[in-house]
Amino acid sequence: MRDLLPVDAKRMRYVEQVSREVSKLYGYDEIITPVLESYDLLAAKTSNEIRERMYTFNDLGDRKVALRPEFTASVARLVATKLRNEPKPMRLFSVGSLYRYDEPQYGRFREFWQANYELFGSARPEADAEILILTNNLLKKLGLQNFCFKIGHTGILREILTQEGMDDEKQNSVRQLLDKKSWADALTVASEANVSQECLATLESLFETSGEDAFKVLESVKETVQDYESALAAVENLWKILELIKDSGEQLEVLVEAGFARGLEYYTGMIFEAYIPGLDIALGGGGRYDKLIELFGGEPIPAVGVAQGIDRIVLALTKQEVTPKTAKDRSVVVISVKDESMAKALELSAMLRNRGLPVEVAVMGRSISRALADADRRGVAYAVIVGPKELEEEKVVLREMKKSTQRTVKISNLTEEILANSA
């Protein structure tokens, strides 16, 4: 876990801010769920690996609780209970910190932040397409370049293994191994579960099938799974999703990977992750989960969602040297020349803040030159110097720090002068 210093906090909040703006553009209502939840709730449909890495303890009521390792279980609980009668579709957004006892490494932290988007009520491919398009637009809005989506469909493998009679526990083991790219070990687990030789050959072929020409890859997958009717339906579903996106004019760079799997057990359909070149960690990911709400006692409600990794997006922005797009700096420091003009400095600072300008008052009693040097070091845009001589004429000195120029202005015009220069 980390202390985030001002520059780091600024980057994190920037990504959070843009994520929230995107949620509003797409009609997602923000909710806030507890950091602490029942262990049973959080453990219900996550992976064994995440269960083992959750921060768990017994509270004073002797209940086993845990810090949330991801958002979806908490959101699903809310949808199954307090929001069960809300009209569908229901679009929900949440943002905050999550916790897993991972071994710290580049892009992986024990406390990390995500922005979460969930769409409930639609099993149609346009809902999946919306989540992909939303993610694409978010990453573009943040200024990232050359990112791509790795896309698959968990229903392809699930339906093959189900038709072969493999139970859920062994299927989850196969998916966990695929998530770690351990293809040989996944085939071994399937073989030990006594699946047919045809199944093993099909799986081996799927694990080797991937490419950037989405529809060509899906045609190949169709041929591979032609003896598995339900798996074929999953391929058709992914085809429709990608076709919708293509026909909408949205430009998505995709890599379709037939053997792609994600660690969480609740996925039932399309799954995806986003990457940039040179950074071998997913910036975010998600997919369809149509059975999770039932698990928490709710009605059957189809759902699709995505979790954007705020920490990882910050790393990606840093790697690509993307400077956050912020409004022109209008920060101000108000410096009093003499102690007797300090009250006026405080009055002026309040006046400027009331117009939305960020204002500091020099409180260290430094000389004018040292106060200006400190303001320059910290990148303050304007200095307002309040001196007895100027005050007699209802004026102050306004200094533009970057240009090292200053002029005397009337107090009545001060706010407009700063706003005009920073427009």
Image (cartoon, grey):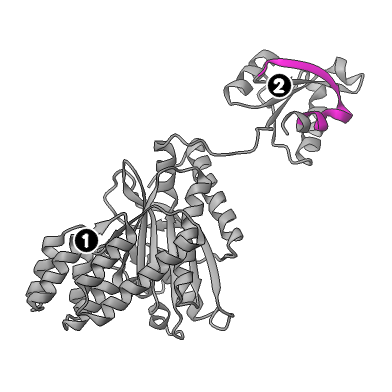
The residue where tag 2 is placed is: 400
User: What separation in Å lies between label 2 and label 1 (alpha carbons)?
Assistant: 60 Å
Residue 367 against residue 276 in the figure, above or below: above
Q: Position of residue 2 (x, y in %)?
A: 40, 44
- The stretch of residues the image draws in magenta is 403-418
Residue 174 - label: none
Residue for point 17% across, 84% down: 165
Q: Nearer the viewer, mark 2 or mark 1?
A: 1
**Horizontal placement of 4 versus 215: left or right?**
right
Residue for point 29% across, 61% down: 216
Q: Mark 2 or mark 1: which comes first in sequence? A: 1
* Residue type, numbered disc 2: Glu
Determine if the magenta segment contains residue 155: no
The residue where tag 1 is placed is: 209
Which of the image's four quarters has the C terminus? Answer: top right
**Horizontal placement of 217 versus 2: left or right?**
left
Residue for point 31% across, 41% down: 278
**Horizontal placement of 253 versus 30: left or right?**
left
Between 243 and 43, the one lying in front of the other is 243
Between 181 and 41, the one lying in front of the other is 181
* Residue type, numbered disc 1: Thr
**How many C-alpha atoms fall within 10 Å of the one at disc 2: few (<14), some, or many (≥20)?**
some
Q: Position of residue 263 (x, y in %)?
A: 28, 64
Q: Position of residue 121 (x, y in %)?
A: 50, 78
Query: In this orientation, does residue 54 appear?
Result: no
Determine if the magenta segment contains residue 406: yes
